[in-house]
Amino acid sequence: MRIHKMVSFSVVIFLITILFAGVAIVPATAQNDTMQYRYNAAHTGDYSHVAGSNVSIGELTWSFTTGAPASSSPAVVNGVVYVGSEDNNVYALNASTGAKVWNYTTAGWVISSPAVVNGTLYVGSDDSNVYALNATTGAKVWNYTTGNDVLSSPAVANGLVYVGSDDNNTYALNASTGAKVWNYTTGSAVLSSPAVVNSTVYVGSYDANVYALNASTGAKVWNYTTGSEVYSSPAISNGVVYVGSSDNNVYALNASTGKVTWSFATGDWVLSSPAVVNGTVYVGSVDGNVYAIGNGPAVASSSTTPGFDVVFAFVGLVIAAYAVRRRT
């Protein structure tokens, strides 16, 4: 199950230094030896603490051509860029030069975005597997086979790998062995990427729900039902879960209870995964807008790019947003 309400994507991965809401793609320093989808297990999307993240020149440094569109978002750790491609490969590239360090070939598209933790890379594939690879060599450490495509991006916390699958399940796998610790079955595909804060896993499902699950047991803590599919991946900040829905809304939910703190209506699907920086929620919509939402919808602002659709979650090396010109 894939979203193709967008135009096609480039087959070339670009390393571009950009600034968007304080977010930039930069090579990791020695202090940044762990990187996950949207920076951390909470998926805040706040890269402001990463060394060198204030560069704003937008200058092309290098490009690396894969064999198909690169929809995966990168993890940059210790001078290496890790990214997946729809040519079935996971690539490790030199962050300074773009030279290939290694690649690992799966049996399906790699849309999932890698997480790199303690020298191991974790990623999903459309071949139904979750993979753990040695981050230095690319050698397979283990794989776990789910019942369908894995577009969800893993979150790693407390020795467990949390990831969704199109087989309707969210899984918790032992990070060292790949053994299943638990799974929770929703009513439809889980393309959303789990976020983990303290002892709770937050994830969306195509059954229109946002779920909070016990991180150790998988037991449901609460669920909140939106008006349509939830592809967006939750971001958790200061006890609030921020997430988009295909019902056109951005939701702020109490992380403990699931009750709505506020919601903000856009003009179309919200497939984008929110970023939360200094109390402001940044999120895109298929209506062509990028929104900055303060402490409630009344102070929301937006920026529209005429002639463009704002595309989130399906980009290569641009973590925050990518504008794709519409066909005319």
Image (cartoon, helix red, strand yellow):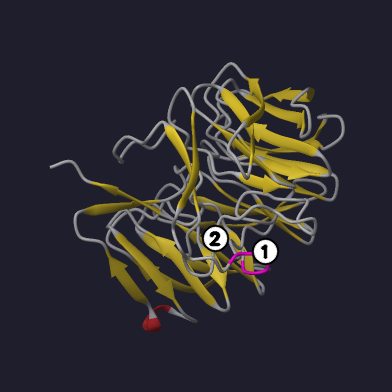
Residue interval drawn in magenta: 48-53
Look at the picture and state if 46 lies above or below 108.
below
Q: Amino acid at mark 1?
A: Val
Residue 296: x %, y % from top left: 46, 80
Residue 198 within the magenta-colored segment of the rendering: no
Q: Amino acid at mark 2?
A: Ala
Mark 1 or mark 2: name the one nearer the start of the chain. 2
Between residue 79 and residue 133, name the one nearer to us: 79
Q: Are marks 1 and 2 in contact (CB under 8 Å)?
A: yes
Look at the picture and state if 255 lies above or below 185.
below
Taking the view exactly as shown, the residue that stands out farthest to the top is: 107
Please tell me how crowded label 1 is: few (under 14), some (14-19), or many (20+) other residues with Cα within 10 Å. Answer: some
Give the spatial CA distance, label 1 vs label 2.
9 Å
* Residue displayed at 55% across by 22% down: 88
Residue 50 within the magenta-colored segment of the rendering: yes
Q: Which residue is mark 2?
A: 24
Q: Which residue is mark 1?
A: 50
